[in-house]
Amino acid sequence: MRILITNDDGINAPGLEVLEEIAHAIAGPEGEVWVVAPAFEQSGVGHCISYTHPMMIAKLGPRRYAAEGSPADCVLAGIYDVLDGAKPDLVLSGVNRGNNSGENVLYSGTIGGAMEAALQGIPAIALSQFFGPEMDGLTDPFEAARTHGTAVVRKLLDAGIWTNDDYRTFYNVNFPPLPAARVKGTRVAAQGFRRDTSFSVEPHQSPSGRKFLWIKGGPQQTPTLPGTDAAVNLDGYISVTPMRADLTAHDLLADLSARLA
């Protein structure tokens, strides 16, 4: 099996090293693992592509590249430049430092990399490690993902639903903010929504008197509705969420057509 991996935390991120372990275990001794990851952190870029300017790509070692672009850029670079158009069998994105549950999905570069792979017709899985106070003191904050990641990916490859329609299914996996031994299992869960919290801005003044704004996230320990991703994670379970890039509100189409007729 040939696997392409990327992330949004950057080529030197510790979560990428965890993902490399998972990918090598899945690919097997006869398989190939190719790394194309951002040269610098790209958290929060979503499904952005560098459409208006070129990006530099550099070979750092055997099957290992850094690109000055987003995770989606890296997937495109991996397919069409590094692999010269030979599509991989699987794309893995992550392991993200922090959860991509709830509304975080819409901002996540980790998700963006997996989404681009799905749009290219390639099976893809995004993996993220929820962080929280019960992980304080852990030598390896990615312990849950490192311990359980290979089994989850293998189970999805063996038993997951992989559609061949235009907007192919891809998967979003979040590991709970717990030591690996306390993970209760895996739950299939819908994307949730953290109510009464959102991204915002926090203004700061530089020594020169200029005003700068920091983007500020909301509390991450806020659960979503029962049975949805963040709630499942905070209850100690790995969440697995099937996703598509199609943003159409299909449940409203018939009613809206009638109203506008």
Image: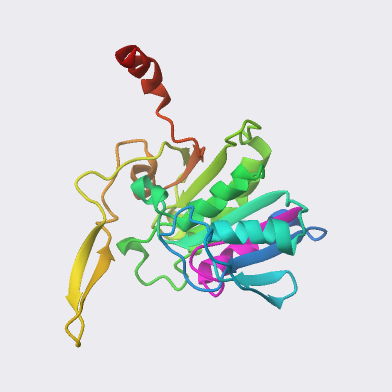
Q: Is residue 77 above or below residue 116?
A: below
Closest to the observer, 207 or 126: 207
Q: Is residue 23 visible?
A: no
Q: Residue furthest right?
A: 30
Which residue corresponds to the image point at 32% horizontal and 16% vertical from the top-left? 260
Q: Is residue 142 left or right of residue 194?
A: right
Closest to the observer, 26 or 63: 63
Q: Residue furthest bottom?
A: 207
x and y, in percent, of residue 95 in the image: 52, 60
Q: Is residue 210 visible?
A: yes
Q: Is residue 148 above or below residue 138?
A: above
Q: How many marks?
A: 0
Q: Quadrant of residue 57?
A: bottom right
Closest to the observer, 94 or 226: 94
x and y, in percent, of residue 241 in the image: 48, 40
x and y, in percent, of residue 64 in the image: 69, 71
Image coloring type: rainbow
Which residue corresponds to the image point at 37% horizontal and 38% vertical from the top-left? 228
Which residue corresponds to the image point at 52% horizontal and 61% vertical from the top-left? 52
Q: Quadrant of the C terminus?
A: top left
Q: Is residue 138 magenta?
A: no
- Residue interval drawn in magenta: 1-23
Q: Is residue 19 left or right of residue 107?
A: right
x and y, in percent, of residue 144 in the image: 49, 58
